[in-house]
Image (cartoon, rainbow, N blue to C red):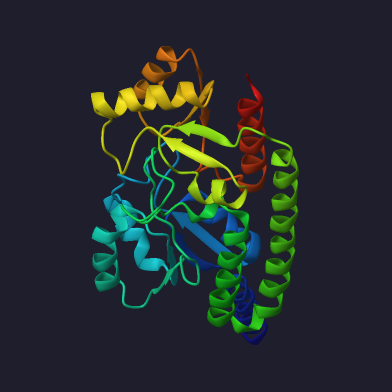
Amino acid sequence: MRLRLFLLFLMISDQTLAQEKIPVFVTILPQKYFVEQIGKELVKVSVLVQPAKSAETYEPTPRQMTDFNQAKLYFSIGMPFEEIWLPKLKENNPHTRFVDAREKITLRKLEDFHSDDHEHGLFDPHIWLNPTLVEIMATQIEKHLSELNPENAPIFRANAAQFIQQLKQLDQNIRLIFRDLKQRKFMVFHPAWGYFADQYQLQQIPIEIEGKETGSKTLGLLLEKAKQENISTIFVQKQLNQRPAQSIAKAINAQVITVDPLAENYIENLYQVAQLLAKAMQSP
């Protein structure tokens, strides 16, 4: 009887170990979506920047710092707060594998609204808003999950291939949305959509530059630019202060539309944003 109980205990223990999930930390919600598409039930993903929080000004909570001790893998993405916190996290968690999601991706600079070049300012961290760049990130995620859990590598590869195919389809669908547009410029409060705009031959006109408040001189130039380009819509990020955008919108008789670059339902959200942008740029 004791032998049977012992064997049953071993069998249950083996099943528990087999079902143990890889603890993964990421910076933002879209990354959680990416990792879960590839890891499925084999991963447990935690996110630093919670819903309704700004990724540009975020600071991890004490609880998150404690929970991070369980992480076997962390994918950073280049947000400003990471420059401060990454050294601390690495020092306190030598067992965690730290991976920069920007590996093998050519970064762009945050552009000024009156400049067509990107040769100044900070690097733009919003790489996830270009589906083709997410394909690179997906390959990276699959690689590191497979190295941590080799026995399930075939599953990770199959899931990554399926996800990449979904991203390719999303890219094609968005290209169709913008295909016949003559107006290719749109105004945003925070310049999060640069990689998206580059991918689809669009140009974002940002109100805020590198987190700085818009001065009276710059505001005047923005108003003039908006009228020249027949801008009828200003897109704002729901995590940020919308008052500056609303003031400009009132001055040029434009509407304000909220979009979320940090939404977790990545494919659905990006397709909906593309539809909103196209509709706004078609407006007289």
Give the x, y percent position of residue 121. 31, 52
Q: Is residue 192 visible?
A: yes
Give the x, y percent position of residue 72. 44, 72
In the orientation shown, which residue stands out farthest toward the front?
A: 228
State the residue at coordinates (62%, 43%): 270
Task: Please state if 80 lies on the left or on the right of 52 as rendered.
Answer: left
Work out whether residue 82 or residue 92 is closer to the camera in this orientation and state it.
82
Q: Is residue 242 visible?
A: no
State the residue at coordinates (50%, 44%): 193
How many numbered marks appear? 0
Locate the N terminus and report the quarter of the image it occupies: bottom right
Residue 99 occupies which quadrant of the picture?
A: bottom left
Q: Is residue 58 above or below residue 132?
A: above
Task: Please state if 232 lies on the left or on the right of 12 as rendered.
Answer: left
Work out whether residue 130 or residue 109 is closer to the camera in this orientation and state it.
109
Q: Is residue 222 above or below residue 136?
A: above
Residue 77 occupies which quadrant of the picture?
A: bottom left
In the orientation shown, which residue stands out farthest toward the bottom?
A: 3
Work out whether residue 187 or residue 17 is closer to the camera in this orientation and state it.
187
State the residue at coordinates (68%, 67%): 160
Give the x, y percent position of residue 178. 69, 40
State the residue at coordinates (29%, 64%): 86
Locate the C terminus and report the quarter of the image it occupies: top right
Q: Is residue 2 above or below residue 64?
A: below
Task: Please state if 142 lies on the left or on the right of 217 as rendered.
Answer: right
Q: Is residue 241 above or below residue 90?
A: above
Give the x, y percent position of residue 53. 38, 39
